[in-house]
Image (cartoon, helix red, strand yellow):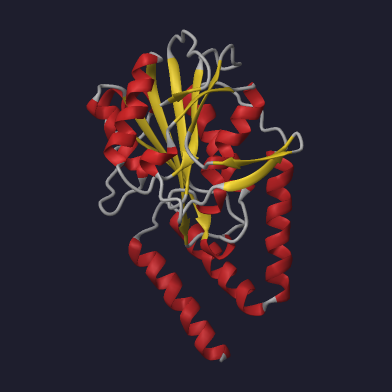
Amino acid sequence: MIELDDLPELENAVLIAAFEGWNDAGEAATGVIEHLAELWGAEPVAALDPEDYYDFQVNRPRVVVEGGRRRISWRTTRILVATDTPIGRDVVLVQGVEPSFRWRAFAIELMELAQAADVTTVITLGALLADVAHTRPIQVTATSDNEDTRHRHDIEASTYEGPTGIVGVLADAAVQVGVSSISVWAAVPHYAHHTPSPKATRAIVSCLEDLLDSPIDHGGLDEDARAWENGLDALASEDTEVAEYVESLEDAQDTADLPEASGDAIAKEFERYLRKRGTDD
């Protein structure tokens, strides 16, 4: 850990982490960290040594010019701290890039910092590409492996099995050291993966409001979300196939939201869409 400034004494702190890469569809998760850092005036206090965790052929350093002088900027993971926040708790923000290797050591180093900062809750943020429509509310799920945490926030245990990213490893590391951990994921329309999704970022922020039991200023996220949705509406209006596909996703989501919705109902809706496409062709 490269210390940039002294770690202040924190009380009942919450750590919120997001990473670029596999866990960050539409840059929705890292967008939350950027929003909160700016909103709460978070100050950097430390960074992980990039030499230990990153393949520089994958995450290349950049040449930047500051004050008329050129220097090398190494991509890494930074730790920022916000004190005296409107939510009534100190906040540790972890902002970085998913490491290339030594994930266990990476997670241990972050958990050692969390313990030194008296962090009581770790919230990891992620976003994935999914078969959802941009016109519908962004689906956000919050889960925890801790029974007390689930009861306190009225959330479920995760039933996911399969490959995981660094946020999954970090959440597990928190559990191993006895720190309450919550995982938050947003579903981003897969056909809109090429642009940042402020609508998904806003949805994660809204979820954090519930978890932290405090309002969080959305800043320009509401306006940006509307512009993002309008842009996709314009794209769909110019392409019949895209418009039909979005409509099929809307129908599937609307069906899934009904009390009687089931896997069979969603499958039938998708079959209806395929039959319609076959007839049109």
Q: Position of residue 194 (x, y in %)?
A: 59, 61
Q: Nearer the viewer, residue 53 or 144?
A: 53
Residue 146 seen in this snapshot: no
Q: Residue at x 48, y 14 (%)?
A: 7
Give the residue displayed 34% in from the left and 66% down from the top: 264
Q: Quadrant of the C terminus?
A: bottom right
Q: Is residue 204 left or right of residue 98?
A: right
Whether residue 12 is visible here, answered yes or no, is: yes
User: Taking 47 as reference, is 230 above or below it?
Assistant: below
Q: Closest to the observer: 40 or 75?
A: 75
The outermost residue toward the left is 176
For this rendering, which residue is in front, 58 or 165? 58
Residue plotted at (59% across, 22% down): 42
Identify the residue shown where x is 42% and y is 30%.
Answer: 123
Q: Is residue 142 left or right of residue 84?
A: left
What is the total number of numbered labels drawn onto the structure image?
0
Image quarter in which the N terminus is found: top left
Give the image location of residue 45, x and y in percent: 52, 21
